[in-house]
Image: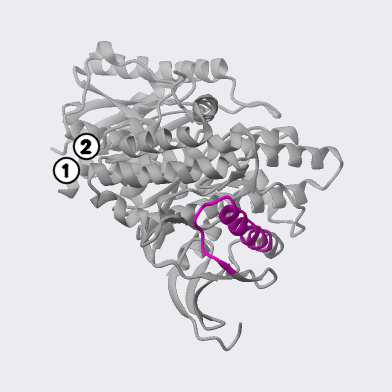
Amino acid sequence: MEGCQTKLIHRGAEADLLLGRWCGLESIYKSRKPLTYRLKVLDDAVRTRRTAHEALMLREAKRVGVRTPYLYHVDTKGAVIIMEYLKGARLKDRASGMSRAGVSAVFGEVGTMVGTLHSSGIMHGDVTTSNLLETSSGLAMIDFGLSTHTQRIEDHAVDLRLIKETLTGAHPMIADLALDSIFAAYRKVVGGARLKQVKRQLSEIERRGRYARAD
Amino acid sequence: MVDSLIGIESTAHTFSASVVTSSGRILSDVRDVYRAPAGGGIHPIEASSQHMANAPGVLREALLEAGIPIKSIRAVSYSMGPGLGPCLRVGAVAARSLAATLVKRIVPVNHAIGHIELGCLLTRTKDPLVLLVSGGHSMVVAFSGNRWRILGESLDLTLGQLIDQFGRHAGLASPCGTKVEEAASKSAKYIELPYTVKGNDVSYSGILTAAKNLLDRGVAFEDVCFSLQETAFAMIVEVTERALAFTEKKEVMVVGGVAANLRLSEMLKTMVRRHSASFRAVPPRYSGDCGAQIAWAGWLEYNTGNSIAIVDATTRQSWRLDSVDAKWRDARRS
């Protein structure tokens, strides 16, 4: 990958996103740079594990029908993934300026996506509005570094809890509507019985949280 | 005559009273701290008995030390919650008595909001991403849309609980932070512990079990302390970094008892450097529980007209900080 012309387009929490070319295609280089605050042995282990894992899960998610970037190349040792460059806006930047109908529609799509992943036994692990892209061909999901194969209700509820936390924390004005839309669409994919179980587990997780009201 | 307010803190091991002026000058901050026996944690009844015995003295001293006429005190604030029931009740009784005696209004304060707002005052940060780490909280918090919002937190144990419960297993007395930090600084041998980050949240229960097991198997205390700190801190710094990247705040501040840990500060400082943000830690004297946090947050609340009648000055053991309307911040912004 050395010698390749790349341009830094985003500095994320755990990775830099660089725009470059790969086999003539416009591509994203996702590079998990060493995080120097972490002890080196721990840091190397975490970065390698997440890189390998993300590459695998990007493909898995695509297989079950969720729009993700195409995977071009993986370098686990260097902790770099090269993938398709999806042009689009992060939902995080779009969410606040949306009409109510827009919020309903797009978060409905989020619910369908998450439901699809869950019913195929995949937990994304980091569903925030910065990991959802609005592209010309619909909503896409990125950043699978924390995802895992799991059928556990607890894990699926953790996914939904993070969505809820992100919405109430960062988009409080649209949170209620967005959540309702997500749950309605999620229900259509996983079924009412499963939704009920996941929701019950979600409240259980919230109750475990510090100083949550036990109601 | 400078307007001031007296605040009473009594959520857990510390009973403290402090007088703070309307401009944020701390005129006094007197504390009495309950010390748990070796190997044990805070016994709520014993802690509250100690608070009861010492409350009058602490209040008296705080008022005397402030050296201001009683009539300049505008109101009495107290930590309404969250915290240990018996301890909270001592603070509420003290606040009610004092308010009745001085004929002042009472202002209820959320303890966590107190940590954050005093932190902002002392570090001169305006709109920081806050890492609140103590025995009661492990949360990443930022202000958005009239409230302090929780962006990430521990799903089970707090960082303070993890360190204390581990320390107690090794025979130390709570709080164990200083001793664990000291022991950790003598080792550089890392033993892998469960690194559990779930989105923006962390889980510490796995580390606690694994670290206790290591001790039981005879692994050196220093090495386990080192590994525990490195793993647990890296996890919370990682979620703080996630929240920082997400919120794009320009300031990061750490508050709460564990903020006094130098290794944690160092890691946060290193992390923040990667982003274009500044890092501030609350001065150690005010990182842990103290009356000043309740007095200052009490002033902010009082200033926006939030005071209650004596009869309503009760306690709330469970009270999440994101349910408090931070009106003073709205006013400051618009």
Quadrant in the rendering for residue B67: top left
Which numbered tag is attached to residue B327?
Answer: 2
Residue found at the very far top of the displayed protein: B311
Position of the N terminus of chain B, as image quadrant, is top left
Under mark 2, the amino acid is Lys
Residue found at the very far bottom of the displayed protein: A3
Q: Nearer the viewer, residue B63 or A53?
A: A53
Determine if residue A140 is in view: yes
Helix or strand or loop: what does disc 1 sit on?
A: helix
The residue that disc 1 covers is: B331
Residue at the image point whose x is 68% and y is 59% from the top: A49
State left or right for residue B298 relative to residue B151: left
Question: Which span of residues is magenta-colored?
Answer: A46-71
| Pointer 1 chain | B
Determine if residue B280 is in view: no
> Contact, CB < 8 Å: mark 1 with mark 2?
yes
Q: Dot 2 surroundings within 10 Å: few (below 14), some, or many (20 or more)?
A: some
Q: Nearer the viewer, residue A211 or A17?
A: A17
Magenta span main SS? helix
Residue B279 percent location from the top left of the image? 42, 60
Q: Is B219 above or below relative to B249?
A: above
Helix or strand or loop: what does disc 2 sit on?
A: helix
Quadrant in the rendering for residue B180: top right
Q: Is B50 above or below relative to A56?
A: above
| Pointer 2 chain | B
Q: Nearer the viewer, residue B67 or A161?
A: A161
